[in-house]
Image: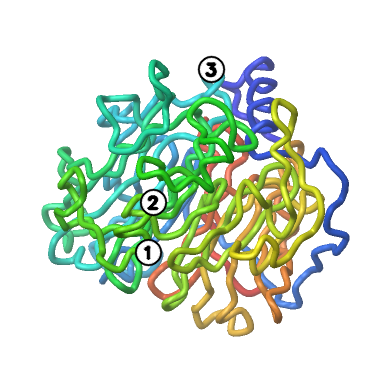
Amino acid sequence: MRLSKTMGTLAIVMAMLAALSTAAVATHDDVISDVIQPSDIGIDLELVADGFTTPLWAINAPGDSRRVFVVDQVGKIWAIKVAPAPNVPDRHLLLDVGAEGLGLLVELGAFGPGTFDERGLLGLAFHPNYTTNGRFYTYSSEPVNGPADFSTMPDGVEAHHQSVIREWRVPNPRNPSSTAAPNSRVLMRVDEPQFNHNAGALVFGPDGHLYIAIGDGGNADDQGDGHAVGGNGQDLSDGNVLGKILRINPTGKNSANGKYGIPADNPFVGSEGADEIFAYGFRNPFRMSFTGQTLIAADVGQNDIEEVDVVVSGGNYGWPVKEGTFLFEMNGDDPGFTTVDSPGVPVGMIDPIAQYDHDEGISIAGGFTYSANELSELRGSYVFGDFSRSFVPASGRIFHLGDGDEILELVPASGALDVYLMGLGQDRRGNVYVLTSENFAPVGETGAMHRLVGD
């Protein structure tokens, strides 16, 4: 593993401890005996761009087939040219909310400079009418700055930080050299009890509404300060949006704070649960995407199970009662653990369509359904990955769902990854991109974006 020279021995140890406590390394028995098999589809990785720190997400803007926009955890959004086009720069900085830019983010490094962190600039979504209105939205980890719109914090206990949804505008979105205006509009602030499990995915659905993935608030086992009895994932109190996927109209006005709209057909409108909630029972739904009308989310597990979920309105995905198809024991002050495999039980909780245990990986990264022409055998298949098989050495993995939603590994012809897989991306043509880094902490410039191609 090649670590940035800025990380000293103590920093590396602290980052390891942080990572071990948050992404959850296998500490229990092998709970799923099946081994993920290699796919018959031959692929390789073509380097498109590098020099990032921690690239987490890459998407196209509506109407723009020439570029993808890469979210770097340290606060930068880069426009990267992926198709031949005259008068389009190869790389262009759309926005910087980090320390070198607007300075909105918390200081990264949960255990000191150069250490692991799950906070930062985590999400990006462009409005469906971006080409005319120039609007896009970000999910960022920011210092506590006034009252939150949603909070689970006990009286007298301050939140660790706030997850903030902001709206930005590009004055001339058709100009490939345009940058975002420096002022933004805050739609929502959510108090976060701990530094981890922030999720952070933003995606517009085919219905034109904005979907927001928020983790359970951090810590382990969905317990501690800022966590409801029985876990935030299952708590439907009005003020608790942790462990949920939300659905809003970002240009509406009928929310409690008057800054966004509540779709009338949201499942908890007029009943128990915040009006914004679309689905619940998640631990850390780090990434999600739409395939047609279908919303697919990847939920990062605790000690044993990583899962892929098809998300439906009002659905309960089990956490922390379940981890994958297995029952989960929160276990009080001691580490929680899975118990028996219990598909379909308790009744009313929705099991994942695919899952794997920590013999295979330690932190799932959701992806996209492949729809490009180059890899015809992969068309229509959901492509995702895992951060790494282990923390040392780096060993990211690329997966796809085969027949019957069987998980298969896509092994590059050039060899297995010796870097961390930080996220995935997709362009307007349906190509899938793999985002990697040599560092598991948000430091250095070893981040890279690779296009999935035929071998």
Q: Position of residue 268 (x, y in %)?
A: 36, 59
Q: Circle 2 is placed at which residue position?
A: 273
Q: Marks 3/1: CA distance?
A: 41 Å
Which quadrant of the view contains residue 34? bottom right
Which quadrant of the view contains residue 132? bottom left
Decide which of tag 2 and tag 1 comes sooner along the chain: 1
**In the image, what residue occupies the spot 31% across and 59% down?**
269
The numbered mark at residue 157 is none
Could you tell me which secondary element the residue under label 2 belongs to?
Answer: loop
Which quadrant of the view contains residue 181? top left
Q: Marks 2/1: CA distance?
A: 9 Å
Decide which of tag 2 and tag 3 comes sooner along the chain: 3
Decide which of tag 3 and tag 1 comes sooner along the chain: 3
- Say if mark 2 contacts mark 1, CB within 8 Å: yes
**In the image, what residue occupies the spot 44% across and 39% down?**
73
244 to 337, vertically: above or below: below
379 to 49, vertically: above or below: below
- Say if mark 2 contacts mark 3, CB within 8 Å: no
Q: Position of residue 25 (x, y in %)?
A: 74, 39
**In the image, what residue occupies the spot 75% across and 73% down?**
39
The answer to whether residue 300 is left or right of residue 359 is left
Q: Amino acid at mark 2?
A: Gly
Pointer 1: residues within 10 angstroms few (<14), some, or many (20+)? many
Q: Amino acid at mark 1?
A: Pro
**In the image, what residue occupies the spot 37% across and 37% down?**
163
Foreground of the two, 87 or 77: 77
198 to 225, vertically: above or below: below
Q: Circle 3 is placed at which residue position?
A: 112
Q: Circle 1 is placed at which residue position?
A: 267
Q: Is residue 428 visible?
A: yes
